[in-house]
């Protein structure tokens, strides 16, 4: 494995309205040493055509078409099977990265399992809103995650691949909160978290985003309790 080569996992489901900007922000990274695996899961809009048109001359972008098999967690697990690098980044098809996002994360000193960044909310038109300030202290991040307060923005995360494999990837049962479920699992295992104290991700909030979903299977607190109980059963 090459330490500076990063694999980006980008699941896409009907993101035609925002996908080009997301892809352009990845291509604009000042750290150029990456592979981006893009998985289409049940997409019925023009997302595939937009992907092909935007990345046709960039061999770092690889397309995986999973047909009608829907579900972000399932798509991420399939993409994870293709990863051959030590670290993985996650990206949503409606979010945007600052050009120095990867560079700033790679400059962080210390052995951290998950490195996030601060994030600024944007709306459907890209208008900036508030910036979400998150803890940079590993102990505080773990503690807050285990209290049901998400401390890692999904599209900001740089993760050791070994951590993802250790917990078996993403849980399709908690679709919509699969990212927070992962942070909780890793917090229970005592993994080291850190957040770069600069907003390097623009997190889009719109009608179709999980942020506004009214049908999530669990609340954040229920996610914490569920994983805590599973850990107790494993130890018994």
Image (cartoon, rainbow, N blue to C red):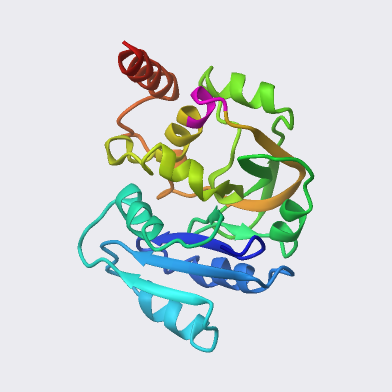
Residue 189 in the magenta stretch? The answer is: yes
Residue at position x 33%, y 39% in the image: 171
Task: Give the image location of residue 173, x and y in percent.
Answer: 27, 36
Q: Quadrant of the N terminus?
A: bottom right
Q: Is residue 60 above or below residue 41?
A: below
Task: Give the image location of residue 232, x and y in percent.
Answer: 36, 13
Task: Give the image location of residue 37, x and y in percent.
Answer: 45, 67
| Residue located farthest toward the left when viewing the structure as drawn | 68
Residue at position x 53%, y 89% in the image: 57
Is 21 on the left or on the right of 210, as rendered? right
Q: Main secondary structure of the magenta part?
A: helix
Q: What is the total number of numbered labels drawn onto the structure image?
A: 0
Task: Give the image location of residue 164, x and y in percent.
Answer: 45, 44
Q: Quadrant of the C terminus?
A: top left
Q: Is residue 119 above or below residue 45?
A: above
Q: Is residue 94 above or below residue 17?
A: above
Residue at position x 33%, y 19% in the image: 230
The segment highlighted magenta reads 186-190
| Residue located farthest toward the top when viewing the structure as drawn | 236
Is 88 on the left or on the right of 100, as rendered? left
Residue 129 in the magenta stretch? The answer is: no
């Amino acid at each position: 494995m090459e330490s500076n080569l990063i694999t980006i996992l980008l699941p896409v489901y009907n993101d035609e309205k925002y996908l080009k900007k997301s892809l352009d922000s990845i291509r604009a990274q000042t750290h150029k040493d990456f592979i981006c695996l893009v998985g289409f899961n049940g997409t019925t809009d023009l997302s595939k055509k937009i992907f092909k048109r935007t990345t046709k001359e960039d061999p770092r972008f690889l397309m995986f078409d999973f047909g009608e098999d829907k579900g972000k967690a399932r798509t991420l697990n399939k993409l994870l099977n293709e990863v051959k690098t030590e670290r993985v980044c996650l990206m949503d098809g409606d979010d945007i990265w600052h050009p120095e996002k990867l560079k700033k994360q790679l400059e962080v000193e210390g052995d951290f399992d998950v490195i996030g960044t601060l994030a600024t909310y944007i709306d459907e038109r890209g208008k900036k809103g508030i910036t979400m300030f998150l803890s940079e202290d590993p102990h505080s991040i773990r503690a807050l995650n285990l209290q049901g307060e998400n401390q890692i923005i999904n599209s900001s995360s740089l993760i050791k691949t070994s951590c993802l494999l250790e917990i078996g990837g993403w849980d399709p049962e908690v679709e919509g909160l699969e990212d927070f479920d992962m942070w909780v699992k890793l917090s229970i295992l005592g993994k080291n978290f850190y957040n770069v104290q600069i907003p390097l991700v623009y997190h889009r909030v719109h009608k179709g985003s999980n942020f506004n979903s009214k049908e999530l299977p669990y609340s954040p607190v229920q996610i914490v309790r569920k994983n805590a109980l599973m850990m107790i059963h494993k130890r018994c």
